[in-house]
Image (spheres, grey):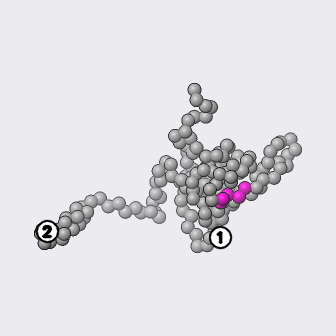
Amino acid sequence: MAIRGTGIVKGLGVTLRTMGAKKVTLKYPDVPIEMPDRFRGIQYFEPDKCIVCNQCARICPTDCITLTGKPNPDPEKKGKVIDTFDLNFEICILCDLCTEVCPTEAIVMTNNFELAAYSRDDLFKDRDWLYGNNRNIREDNNNIGAPQRGGAK
């Protein structure tokens, strides 16, 4: 048989304990939030490094990357140059797969996460917007926990 009023006493005990605890409120818009090292934020794209290999578009599980290239205008050089690179953040799940397969590290993740928009059309970003997203780029992007380049020794 339970004693009457024990629930109220337990509830008041929890309330009194939390009243003296340290506050955890963040001053978010005024003070930026420090994200962890492996946080996957909005991508940064460097068009000059892209060799139009299409690996990023092929590995994307949501097909949110559109990449097209054209032949190099310089007849002395082989390969393609990038024509368009579009990313649809409406369906992008920020899985980091596109950055892992990029052989030239043209796509890298940043710690930026603010993508709020009033229209879905604003969530389609092109290569110029992604190139301008150059704040808070992860310093060690593709090698976190991976072996160093050059194979095993």
Q: Residue furthest right?
A: 75
The residue shown at (35%, 60%) is: 24
Residue 2: image tag: 2
Observer-nearest of 3 and 84? 3
3D distance between C-alphas at marks 1 and 2: 60 Å
Q: Is residue 102 magenta?
A: no
Give residue 62's quadrant in the image. bottom right
The residue shown at (81%, 52%) is: 70
Q: Residues within 10 Å of mark 1 (few under 14, many from 20)?
A: few
Main SS category, magenta section: strand
Q: Residues within 10 Å of mark 2 (few under 14, many from 20)?
A: few
Mark 1 vs 2, N-terminal side: 2
Discs 1, 2 touching: Cβ within 8 Å: no
Residue 121: image tag: 1
Q: Residue furthest front?
A: 1
Label 2 is placed on what type of residue? Ala
Q: Is residue 153 left or right of residue 28?
A: right
Residue 42: image tag: none
Observer-nearest of 142 and 57? 57
Q: Quadrant of the C terminus?
A: top right
The stretch in magenta equals 63-67
